[in-house]
Structures are given as C-alpha cells and as structure tokens.
Amino acid sequence: MSKKTRRENAILASPMVLFLLAILGFPTVLSIVYGFSETSFETLTRPEFSGLANFADVLSDPTFWQAAWFSLRFGLITALLQCALGLALAVYLAPLVERHGWTVAVLIIPIMVAPAMMGLMYRLVLHEFAGPLPHYLYAWFGTAPSFLGPAHVFKTVVLAETLQWTPFAFVLFLTAYQAIPSELREAAAVDSARPWDVFRHIEWPLMRPTLYVALFVRFIDGFRVFDNIYTLVGAGPGGSTTSMSIYIYESFLRRGEIGKAMAAAILLFLTAFLLLAFGQRLTKGRTE
C-alpha cells in the first residue's frame, strides 16, 4: 500500500474515529476521574481528588469479594454447561438441520428475547406464592422447593442463564460442524469407522478452536451478568446473587457511592481486559 493510499484511508476514517473517541472517550475519562475522586450526586460537578481511597474501600469491602466470587462461579459454570449442551445439540441435530434448515430459527428463539424479559418471565413462573410451577408441584407432590430461596437461588439463576444462551453455543458449534469437509467423513466411512471414532478423531479436533472461542465468550458474558438476574431475583437473599455488575449498580444508584462504584467498574474493566488478552493468547496458542 502506497503512502498516498494510507494517507487517503486515514483521512476517510478520521470522522468515524473522532466520533468514537467523543462517544466512548468522554465517559471513560469521566469514569476514571470519578474513580479517583470523592464524589456523590451532590458533588458531581466538583469531584475532590482522593487518590486510591475508592479502590481501597472496594478491595476491603466483603460484599465486593462476594460479588467477584459469584461472578467467577456463575460465569465458569454457565459457560461449561452452555458449551457442553450446545456441542451435543449441534452434533445430534446436524442431520435434522441439514434436511430442515428452518429448525435453527426455532432453536434460537430464546436468544432473541431480551434477558430482562426472560428474568421477569422466570420470576413469574417460579414465584413461591404466585408461580404456576411451585403451585402444580405442591398440588401433585405435596411439596415444592423455594426456587428463589437461599438454598436454590444459585441453581435457579444458572439454569435460567443456561437455557437462554445455550442456543448461542449451539449455532457456533453447528457452523463449525457443517464446515468440516464431507470428504473426511466419507473417507472414514470407507474405513468402516464408527460414529464415535469419527467424532473423536476427525470432527472434535476440527471443532476444538470453536470450543475455546465459545467458552471464552460465554464466560465473559456470564461474568458481567446483570439484567436477567436483577429482574429475576435482584441481589438475592443475603446478597447471594450479587454479581459485579449488580454491585456497581447498587453502589451507584442505591447508595450514591459514585466514586466507589466507578472504582469497582475500573477493576471490572481491567479484569475483563486481562481475561480477554489471556483468552486470545490461549486460543492463538491452541490453534497454531
């Protein structure tokens, strides 16, 4: 590419770059300023620099570490479940999808619904006093678990997240499965290879990079989860379902601790950035 072409490309791209810097840069700079300042709703226009005090408050807050532990467990468990189910469905339903492509549209309906709406739906269905599921369980079996109570709430939110986002993993794995050259399967069939051997020695190695991508994407999404859990159960009994995003939201809007909330948001961003860099490096190393 010539120097003149590079200059023309830079000139053409500059309006979009400036627009993105204005849209994304200003909130980022403002968040950093508030993160290092003693700020409340009364002092938004005149924050007082406080150094690392907000970060120290966040790191010494047991609720923050409880939220971090919840986000880590939730993100890891849901990512593993979604990828395992998505992979199994993609392999099992691939022949059906090949004959009836419209079935994919039916299977991905859950990811078309807003997570907040899914949370509200599950809240109505599982409510201890008004929900139809506890009602019929009690009518048929004489007992019904408190799905949103302390003993079962974590399993409930994990199941709700898994049911909604497994179709996302399914689409990724289905695409990878359909991209495998048919000649490889035909050659295996000539050698009288069993279906399990074909999957284990041919299909699985070719689909493995997709697994790393799916695991990483779903883990990051689960780690920063907010809307579906907040509409389903909020912070949960005793704060048991307080994720990092919910912690930041409640610090900002419920308690008015803007500086502390921004410090937690910066820590969340740095964590996500480091996980992204680590995931890209791991994926690159696995695929080379």
Image (tube, rainbow, N blue to C red):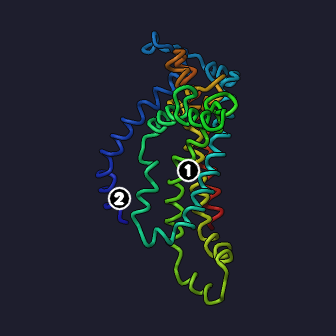
The residue lying at 46 percent from left, 56 percent from top is 107
- Label 1 and label 2: CA atoms lie apart by 33 Å
> Between residues 239 and 129, which one lies in front from this camera angle?
129
- Which residue type carries mark 2? Arg
The residue pinned by badge 2 equals 6
Q: Where residue 284 appears, x then y in whole percent? A: 61, 61
> Which label sits on residue 217?
1
Within the image, what quadrant is residue 108 found in? bottom left
Q: Where residue 58 appears, x then y in whole percent? A: 64, 23
Q: Quadrant of the C terminus?
A: bottom right
> Between residues 124 and 102, which one lies in front from this camera angle?
124
- Which residue type carries mark 1? Val
Q: Nearer the viewer, mark 1 or mark 2?
A: 1
The residue lying at 39 percent from left, 63 percent from top is 102
Q: Where residue 37 appears, x then y in whole percent? A: 54, 18
Dot 2 alpha-carbon crowd within 10 angstroms: few under 14, some 14 to 19, many 20 or more: few
Tell me if 220 is positioned left or right of 111 in this view. Answer: right
| Callout 1 secondary element | helix
> Between residues 53 and 87, which one lies in front from this camera angle?
87
Q: Is residue 52 visible?
A: yes
